[in-house]
Amino acid sequence: MNLIEKILVNHSTQKKVKPGDIIDVSIDARVARDFGGANVVKNLIENGLQVDDTSKTFFTFDCNPGGSDQKYAANQHFCRQYARENNLKIYDINGGIGTHLAIDNGLILPGGTFVSTDSHANIMGSIGAFGQGMGDQDIAAVWANGKSWFKVPKSVKLTLKGKRPKNVSAKDIVLNLLDNFGANKLLGYSVELYGEAVDELTLDERITISSMATEMGAIIILITPTEKIINELESLSGKTIDSISADPNAEYDQLLDVDISEFTPMVAMPGHPHDDVNISEVKGEKIDSAFLGSCTNGRISDLRIAAEIMKDKKIAPGVVMKIVPATDEIWQQALDEGLIKIFKQAGALVSNAGCAGCAAGQVGQNGPGEVTVSSGNRNFAGKQGKGSVFLTSPAVIAASAVAGFITTPDEIPAQPVEFSAKGLILGSQKEKSVPQSTPVKFVGKVWLIEQNDIDTDMIFHNRYLTITDIKEMGQYAFDNLEGYEDFAKKVEPGDIIITGKNFGAGSSRQQAVDCFKSLGIPLILAESFGAIYERNAINAAMPILTYDSDLIQKLDIKSGDKVIVNLEQGTIQNLETKKEGNVTPFSQVQMEIYKRGGLLNN
């Protein structure tokens, strides 16, 4: 067996699995964060469910450590009350990023299983463990049952050949991989990373690379832990750890080789993590702000790199630099090593540990027109604010903050470039709400959105994540998708969405499904769906179907056409042209959950 198969088998009643098998998997650590936690608790209470094992069940408050938003503060307190009554451990607002805490504190070990309301739970691949982001219904079911169903993914063995260039950071490695594979070439795959350069990666570097599996569309990037990594994990957690690896004769769907010696320092252009260019193409681009942190680059090694560059220097006039360590332990270590003093003397804002900018609940957001260099994992439009976000390495971020423009540490000018700040835009929309039903045949008017990689921030922006009432969600559907900002005002109940590849890429937010239910949209067809989005839709009894790429042309489907779709038979007919075709019918599991009205309905 390969690595993902071995981990899943070890947590199931199966002795052997193959790609496509759907099995029940026991979960070693089950986590809810502060934005999803309240909905998890709500689902448990409303369905009369109890936590099956409190020793494996945790809250992590990392999205809004300051509780600076009233709804976040209310949700956090609601979760605290539930935790007190049920003897659950909370890693509260002083702890840091939940996935990092799980690794450093040994909540998850190599070969283990981990789920969270965090779409980057697959960061556990960095230690050779399985992690999966889930929506709040999924997490509630795991808290109650200790297990959940999973479809065994196909696996890719990706070997990095050659020697890693000295100026290529771990962030550059993953940006080069994104440039190579894009956002959907590895969609739905478990990727195992091998090679001499991979074996030499530190724990922090492995975390950086694995944390961006979601941006590549992959289920997870798994890296087999070396003896050195095992020793470090044992030192951090105080636990004795056994390693795990794929069998020598393991089978893979694809065997891929990439020459790491050809990798270069990269920058992801605003809007898409997979739109990457050599840094030479953007050198000199003036910036307004710099952000160092996130689950991708908030480790102590990242802070050391930045401090070495910034020592005895000042941040460029008018530039704002925000630094957020991943955990409180890392923050304290940075203080002990004098890194915090270097940052403060340079003029940076150093925040308490947490997710920061990409979670919209802490420092790191930018305003309209603002240009930011960020170490985050996502730069989707609107993800870190209304400005433009370039993704790059800690070294480039530190150098650029001092220079006032994008540059490398070896090209920091004697005099920085100055600039002026810009304004802020606010807006709102009205809501619609329609009750759910469970027919197997639908007739509706088509919204044909011929775009790939429509992410969850385009569907339902993270600034609305505190909303728990589904009736309030519809008004915000697609309001961050260019050209469809008024979608919620124009769509009618019964309309059907047909779109491209990797629909729902990105976050684990359930609202990106529920906003369409709120509007009365009964069905979404796409060439493929993001892995977490697919789970959330199935579990929420929201019909989703996939189709082959030639279907639109074959049936001559246009926006406004009426179609009839049968979930059981997997058929579609364009009533305007009378042309018929096939879509992927519901699986047995999908149909069972759909007819029950959702995962949590008995």
Image (cartoon, helix red, strand yellow):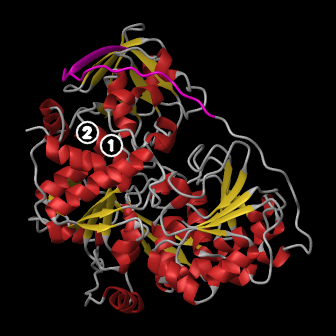
Determine which residue is flagged by label 1: 534
Position in image of residue 333 (x %, y %): 52, 85
**Residue 583 vertical position relative to residue 16 in the rendered view, above or below:** above
* Side (left or right) of 313 relative to 223: right
Residue 231 lies in magenta, yes or no?
Answer: no
Q: How many marks?
A: 2
Q: Main secondary structure of the magenta part?
A: loop
The amino acid type of the residue labelled 2 equals Ile
Question: Residue at the location (62% across, 80% down)?
Answer: 340
Question: Residue at the location (64% across, 77% down)?
Answer: 261
Position in image of residue 295 (x %, y %): 48, 66
Position in image of residue 486 (x %, y %): 54, 22
Badge number at residue 401: none
Snapshot quadrant of residue 403: bottom right
Q: Is residue 379 visible?
A: yes
Classify mark 1: residues with Cα within 10 Å, few (<14), some (14-19) or many (20+): many
Determine which residue is flagged by label 2: 538
Q: Which residues are magenta?
A: 426-444
Position in image of residue 571 (x %, y %): 28, 22
Observer-nearest residue: 41 or 216? 41
Observer-nearest residue: 100 or 35? 35
The amino acid type of the residue labelled 1 equals Glu
Name the quadrant of the C terminus. Answer: top left
**Residue 582 vertical position relative to residue 220 in the rendered view, above or below:** above
